[in-house]
Image: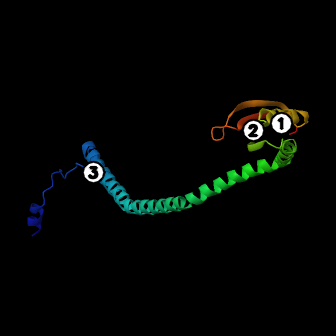
């Protein structure tokens, strides 16, 4: 039976003294080395295949986390806009309250020197110390008197009549605009 077993196995490599020859040693080395390379490659492929599942799970978790954070940001956008608007308004208010002493003093000074038949429709202050007034009156003398009165104070410099015209709604009234530079800041 052993003779039949040897006949069933085919060995293409010569058995006698082949391992001691140079070609035999090189062939044995190549076979053993390639066997190791194939095993290492299979291990690397298996690791890469298994790590794919871990990386997919991590990617899904990160995507969900990003979506949650985007939802939080979108939900707080209205509050943030309202907060920024309030901050801007508070900044404007603080700037106005810093100048409130000068503003009150200026308006009081204009009120004292205002002729009886003259009505102011708007009063404005600009950042570069410019004071603007608009109003209506039935005659030019009231405008002239207001300009003279404001020039006599120590609060205004270069009181100028910017424009004067007849009011479209009431032809008996004159509309005017006066600009001046404030001295005491």
Q: Which residue is mark 3?
A: 31
Residue sitting at 71 percent across and 32 percent down? 164
Instruction: Please report whichever mark, 2 or 1, sits nearer to the chain's N-terminal start.
Output: 2
From the top left corner, tell me how far across and down residue 74 is, in percent: 52, 59
Q: Which residue is mark 1?
A: 146
From the top left corner, tell me how far across and down residue 159 is, in percent: 82, 31
Tell me if mark 3 has few (under 14), some (14-19) or many (20+) residues whose alpha carbon lies within 10 angstroms of its own. Answer: few
Q: Secondary structure at mark 2?
A: loop
Work out whether 114 lies above or below 165: below
Please state which of residues 55 and 102 is positioned toward the viewer in this rendering. Answer: 102
Give the residue furthest to the front.
172
| Quadrant, the N terminus | bottom left
Work out whether 179 lies above or below 60: above
Q: Is 98 on the left or on the right of 163, as rendered? A: right
Work out whether 134 lies above or below 31: above
From the top left corner, tell me how far across and down residue 23 is, in percent: 25, 43
Give the residue furthest to the bottom.
1
Q: Which residue is mark 2?
A: 138
């Amino acid at each position: 039976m052993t003779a039949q077993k040897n006949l069933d196995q085919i060995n293409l490599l010569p058995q006698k003294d082949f391992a001691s020859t140079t070609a035999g040693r090189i062939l044995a080395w190549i076979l053993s080395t390639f066997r190791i390379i194939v095993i290492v490659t299979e291990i690397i492929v298996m690791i890469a295949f298994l790590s794919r599942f871990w990386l997919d799970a991590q990617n899904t978790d990160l995507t969900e986390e990003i979506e949650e954070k985007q939802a939080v940001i979108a939900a707080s956008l209205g509050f943030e806009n309202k907060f920024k608007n309030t901050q801007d308004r508070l900044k404007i208010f603080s700037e106005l309250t810093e100048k409130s002493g000068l503003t009150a003093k200026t308006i009081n000074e204009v009120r004292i020197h205002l002729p009886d038949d003259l009505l102011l429709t708007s009063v404005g202050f600009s950042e570069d110390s410019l004071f603007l007034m608009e109003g209506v009156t039935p005659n030019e003398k009231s405008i002239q008197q207001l300009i003279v009165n404001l020039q006599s104070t120590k609060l205004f410099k270069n009181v100028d009549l910017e424009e004067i015209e007849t009011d479209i709604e009431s032809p008996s009234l004159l509309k005017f605009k006066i600009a001046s530079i404030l001295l005491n800041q």
